[in-house]
Amino acid sequence: MHEMSLCEGIREVIVGEATRHSVARISRVRLEIGRFSGVEKPALEFAFDVVMRGTPAEGAALEFIDIPGRGWCYDCMKDVTIDDRLSPCPECGGGKVLATGGDELRIKDMEAQ
């Protein structure tokens, strides 16, 4: 389960920012998750609850913001939204689409108390 290691990295950022801003409690964390990131949200939620124990984010609400897949079509020369890395271009139907986005996982923001 790589979601556990992802949450360990998220914990480092949260603890660092809480310390830097003298925050005792984080009540909400919003994550941007790309369509192609390979993250399983239920597993991430479980891991988040486990990994955040004993930190300022213990018991924090976890919210997801879905980021669509993006690609560059070499046939019509457009930046397009794609559902799958191998999808044809939704604009022209061409098959020369290079995935350019949608694999991200990042903290969008945190709410402190």
Image (cartoon, helix red, strand yellow):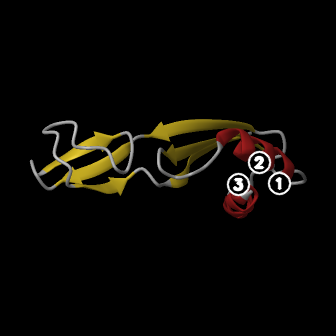
Q: Please say whether residue 84 is visible from this viewpoint.
A: yes
User: CB under 8 Å between callouts 1 and 2?
Assistant: yes
Q: Amino acid at mark 2?
A: Phe
* Image side of residue 8 versus residue 80, left or right: right
Q: CA distance from mark 1 to mark 2?
A: 5 Å
**Circle 3 residues within 10 Å: few <14, some 14–19, many ≥20:** some
Q: Label 1 is placed on what type of residue? A: Val
Q: Is residue 107 left or right of residue 34?
A: right
Q: Quadrant of the N terminus?
A: bottom right
Q: Which residue is mark 3?
A: 3
* Amino acid type for the residue under numbered disc 3: Glu
Q: Of marks 3 and 1, which one's residue comes earlier in the chain?
A: 3
- From the top left corner, tell me how far across and down residue 63 is, in percent: 63, 35
Instruction: Check whether the beta carbons of the residues at disc 3 and disc 2 lie within 8 A of each other.
Output: no
- Answer above or below: position of 96 versus 44: below
Q: Name the mark on residue 51.
A: 1
Q: How many marks?
A: 3
Furthest residue toward left: 76
For the C terminus, the image quarter is top right
Residue at left offset 81%, top offset 50%? 56
> Which circle marks residue 48 in the picture?
2
Mark nearest the camera among 3 and 2 is: 3
